[in-house]
Amino acid sequence: MKKAFVFLILCLGCSKSSDPGTSTIPTPSTGVTPGGSTGGTTTPSTASEVPSHFKLIYGATKITSDGTYVTIEATGAPDHKSVYYATNSSLYETFSGKTYNGLNFAKNPNSISSGLYTFKIPVKPVAATKVTATSLGAIGISLNGVPFYNQYAGPNQPLTGEMTSFDQYYGHPAPGGKYHYHVEPLYLTTVKKDKMALLGFLLDGFPVYGPWENGKAVTNANLDVLHGHTHATTEFPAGIYHYHITQEDPYINGNGFYGTPGTVSQ
Ligand SMILES: [Zn+2]
Ligand SMILES: [Zn+2]
């Protein structure tokens, strides 16, 4: 019965593809396993079809596909409470005490503002012949539309000095108000999903999974220098390269992208 239900959802998605390149974004319910159309499976993809795993990005304001790239728009502002929202915002929540790694929280002077991100990500990610390093700023997008940042606070600056400013869900805003995650997005791993879930995608189109797998914490020793490895996942039963978030540096991505990165305007 569950399989039939999933099939129905997929077909409802298909019926909307008469609008070229546009797809409304249904909110997938937890536990539904979307059928992947990348990562080695043979599901054919029409030019206007957004693969169902990208539709898991519930925080996107718009997702379209031209068959080669999926274009994802988002404001980047979190859907969860934060001490970095303006105090008159309904999403403001005070926070003090311990944050990431048991550090004493110290608020930075910035406050969250909405941006306009446009991510252009390969629909069918492939391994690159040459590794491209990540840059500062957005390196990917999480399910709630908040960008992932890499393991640096500035050019060659370790993240450790910034960690004290991570809020109750381990994100913080940069000067100018752009909110982002350098580490585990706690709202997604504890409220919306769980620690083993798919949490987003990097710019090269490869998925990012949580800090646990098969009931155990993933460590850097389980991953390659780019911070990923290959095996079957719920969304990609035929197997796919994927990144894992870990508790230890480099947290999300290591020495660069496994695939050829798309672009982001921010
Ligand atoms: Zn930061
Ligand atoms: Zn894995």
Image: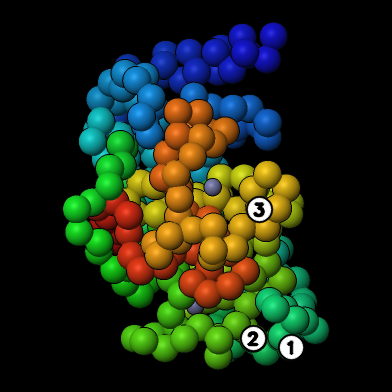
**Marks 1 & 3, CB-CB < 8 Å contact:** no
Apparent side of residue 157 relative to residue 27 in the rendered image (left or right): left
Q: Nearer the viewer, residue 214 or 159?
A: 214
Of the numbered discs 1 and 2, the one sitting upstream in the chain is 1
Residue hosting label 1: 104
Quadrant in which the C terminus appears:
bottom left
- At label 2, the amino acid type is Thr
Quarter of the image where one finds residue 126: top left
Where in the figure is residue 41, as x and y percent of width and height? 38, 24
Residue hosting label 2: 164
- At label 1, the amino acid type is Asn
Q: Is residue 80 visible?
A: no
Apparent side of residue 231 relative to residue 21 in the rendered image (left or right): right
Of the numbered discs 2 and 3, the one sitting upstream in the chain is 2
Q: Nearer the viewer, residue 36 or 215?
A: 215
- At label 3, the amino acid type is Trp
Q: Which type of secondary structure does the marked residue at label 2 adopt? A: helix
Residue hosting label 3: 212
* Mark 3, other Cα within 10 Å: few <14 / some 14–19 / many ≥20: some
Of the numbered discs 1 and 3, the one sitting upstream in the chain is 1
**Marks 1 & 2, CB-CB < 8 Å contact:** yes
Where in the figure is residue 40, as x and y percent of width and height? 36, 29
